[in-house]
Amino acid sequence: MSRRVAIVLWIAAAVVVWNAVFDRVLVLAGREYVKTAKAAADGSGPYARIDDSMRPALSRALAFATLAAGAVAAAGVLDDRRRSRATSAGSPRRT
């Protein structure tokens, strides 16, 4: 596989991971809000505003998704370096 294709695939993987993590965190926050709102509607809890649940979740989602995508991108950089070292070690040196 060429170096350019590998880099594009690592970037694509980082984008997919960012989207998946971001979505998952927001979905879980939405489910938690529904539980809280249901409890409030049943009369056993305080009034639930969606903003109180989703604003912190948005910040958390951005942070977690960016960290996860950064880890994938870092793995891509390390893989690229490993491949370039293996390639350069096997090729004869010019003098």
Image: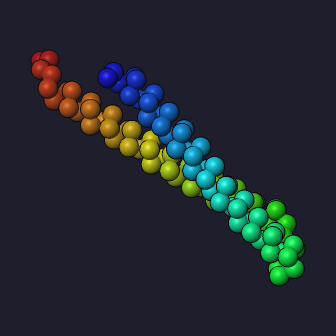
Going by the image, does 61 lie left or right of 68?
A: right
Q: Please provide percent x and percent y for residue 67.
A: 52, 52
The furthest residue to the top: 94
Position above or below: 44 against 78: below
Q: Residue 2's x, y, as percent? A: 33, 21
Q: Position of residue 27 (x, y in %)?
A: 67, 55
Q: Is residue 94 left or right of residue 57?
A: left
Q: Residue furthest front?
A: 42
Q: Nearer the viewer, residue 25 or 6?
A: 25
Task: Pick the quarter of the image with the N terminus.
Answer: top left
At 85% from the left and 66% from the top, the residue drawn is 49
Q: How did the renderer colour the structure?
A: rainbow
Residue at 77%, 71% (x, y): give it.
36
Q: How far across and how far down the image is residue 56, in percent?
A: 71, 63
Residue at image point 54% right, 38% down: 15
Q: Residue furthest bottom?
A: 44
Side of 82 where 37 appears, left or right: right
Frontmost residue, 1 versus 43 = 43
Q: Residue at x 44, y 30 (%)?
A: 9
Considering only vertical position in the picture, is 22 above or below 86?
Answer: below
Determine whether 16 is above or below 3 in the image: below
**Figure quadrant of residue 30:** bottom right
Q: Is residue 59 visible?
A: no
Q: Is residue 36 above or below residue 77?
A: below
Figure disc tally: 0
Can residue 33 be seen?
Answer: yes
Query: Which quadrant of the figure has residue 95?
Result: top left
